[in-house]
Amino acid sequence: MTRPLGFLAVVWPANAILLGLFVTWPELARRSGWLSALLGYLLAGNLSGDPLATNLWLTAANLGGVACAWLGFQLLDEEDRRLRRPMSMLRFFLICVSAATGAALIGCGLAPGLLDRSVLTGLVYWFTAELINYTILLPVLLTMDLETIRGLPDPLRRPWKEVVRHLAPLASLCASVAAAIVVGGPGAIAFSVPALLWCSMTYRLFPMSVIMLAFSVVMLQAQGSGFMVTSDHYDFLDGTASFRVGIAVLVLGPLTVTNIMTLQRVLFDKLERAATLDSLTGILGRHAFLSRSRAVLDSLSGDHGFALLMIDIDHFKQINDRYGHQAGDVVIRAVTAAIAGELRKADLFGRLGGEEFAVTLDATDPLAAEALAERVRRAVEDLRIDIDRDAPLAVTISIGLTHHRRPPAKGLSQSLGMADAALYRAKAEGRNRVCSRLAEAL
C-alpha cells in the first residue's frame, strides 16, 4: 500500500517489519517463514505491475537485506536484541548499516531502468532508503511490550498538573519541529535535539521509539515536500540522501540516552530495595522499618492511635540446632508470609533481626490491634512447614503489643521498649500467646 503502481515506494516498511517479526518471534524465522516472505514479496510485486525479472530482482534485494540483518542479530543476546543496554543502539545501527548495504548492493543494478539513474546513484538511494526505514521502524518493534503497555497508568486518572508536566517534553518537541520547518536551512535538522534529549530523559524506551518514529516521518515528509531544502543547488545525492542519513544517525542519540536513563532507574530501584528490604524475607529491613514507624508516630492524630507489635518465633534456636540454618531460613520465610497475609496494605512489617519481627499499625484502636495480633498468632500456629523431613514442622510465635493514642514522651524508643516488655512477658507465661501493655500506653 506504500508503493504506487508502476513506481518504487518512497517509504518501504516491509523489510523492517519482517525483520522485527523474525527477531521478536524467532520461531517464525524457519524455512517456512522465509518461504512465506518470499511469496509475499513476489505477490506484492505482481500486484504492482512489475515484470517477472524486476519482481525477482527487487525481492532478492529485500530478502538479502533482511538476511544480512538477521545474521547480525544472531550474534547478540536477548538484552541487546531488545535494545536494553547503552551499547545496544550502536550495535543495532551497525546491523542496520549491514542490512542497508546488502539490499543496496543487490538492488542498485535496477537504477538505470527503474530510476533512470546511474548505478552509483541507485546504490546511494537504496542504502539511504533502507537505512532510514530500519532505524526508525525497528526500535518500535523490538521494544514493544504488550504487558508494559497494558500496565501504563490511565492519564485521565492522574492529577492535571502531573499530566501537563509529563507532556511538556513532547509539546516542546512539536514546537521545535514546527520551528525547523518554518525556518529551514542547514541547521534546521538540529533544532529538535534539546527537546529530543528532554523526551529521552522523561519517557521509557518504547514510547521514545514511537516518538522518534513520528519525528522522523514528519521531518522526512517536510524535506520531501520542499520545506527543508538545505541548498540552493538541491540535487538527489546532496539533498535527500544526506538528509536521510542525518535522520538515521540522529535517532541513535535520544534512544541511547533513554537506554542509559532506564538502566539508571533499574540500578536505583535495586539499590533502594537493597537498602530498604530484608534480603531473606522481602519485607522492610530494620533501618527502614524504624524510620517509617517513627514518621507514622510523629504524625499521629485522630482517636484511634498507633499500635506496635513485637513478634518472636518460639524456640527458634532449637530449630536451627536440630534442622540446620537452611531449614531455619525456610521457617522464617514461611512465618513472614503467614504474618503478611493477615496485615493491611498500610501496615508496616519489618524484620528487626534473626527471628524477631515488628508490625506498626496506624489508625487502629486497642481492641482491633489485639484482634489482629491474635489472628497473626493463629495463622502461624496453623502453619505446617515442609523442611524435607518425615513430618512437616509446626511453629508458634509470641507477640508483645503496645498501643498509643498520642506519641509517647520518648518517641518510638519508648514504644519499642513497652512492646518488648510485653513480648518478654508472653514468653515467660508459656509462649504462643499475645500480651499487651495497653493500660500504660493509653
Image: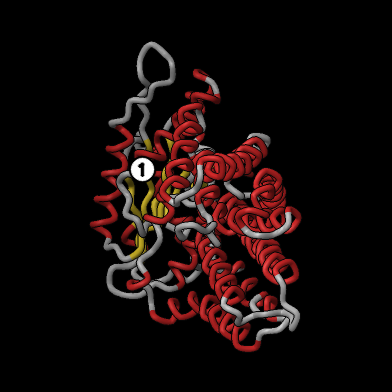
Q: Amino acid at mark 1?
A: Ile
Q: Position of residue 422 (x, y in %)?
A: 39, 49
| Left or right position of 255 against 35 | right
Above-or-below relation of 344 to 302: above
Residue at left offset 37%, top offset 57%: 347
> Residue 361 versus residue 260: which sits nearer the camera?
260
The chosen color scheme is secondary structure
Q: Is residue 86 visible?
A: no
| Residue at mark 1 | 339
Residue at left offset 69%, top offset 55%: 122
Circle 1 residues within 10 Å: few <14, some 14–19, many ≥20: many
Residue at left offset 50%, top offset 18%: 322
Q: Is residue 395 visible?
A: yes
Q: Position of residue 177 (x, y in %)?
A: 58, 80
Secondary structure, mark 1, is helix
Q: Quadrant of residue 57?
A: top right
Q: Position of residue 430 (x, y in %)?
A: 35, 34
> Residue 137 versus residue 327: which sits nearer the camera?
137
> Residue 321 versus residue 58: which sits nearer the camera?
58
Q: Quadrant of residue 202?
A: bottom right
Above-or-below relation of 149 to 214: above
Q: Position of residue 145 (x, y in %)?
A: 46, 50
Residue at left offset 56%, top offset 77%: 225
- Which quadrant would the N terminus be assigned to in this image? bottom left
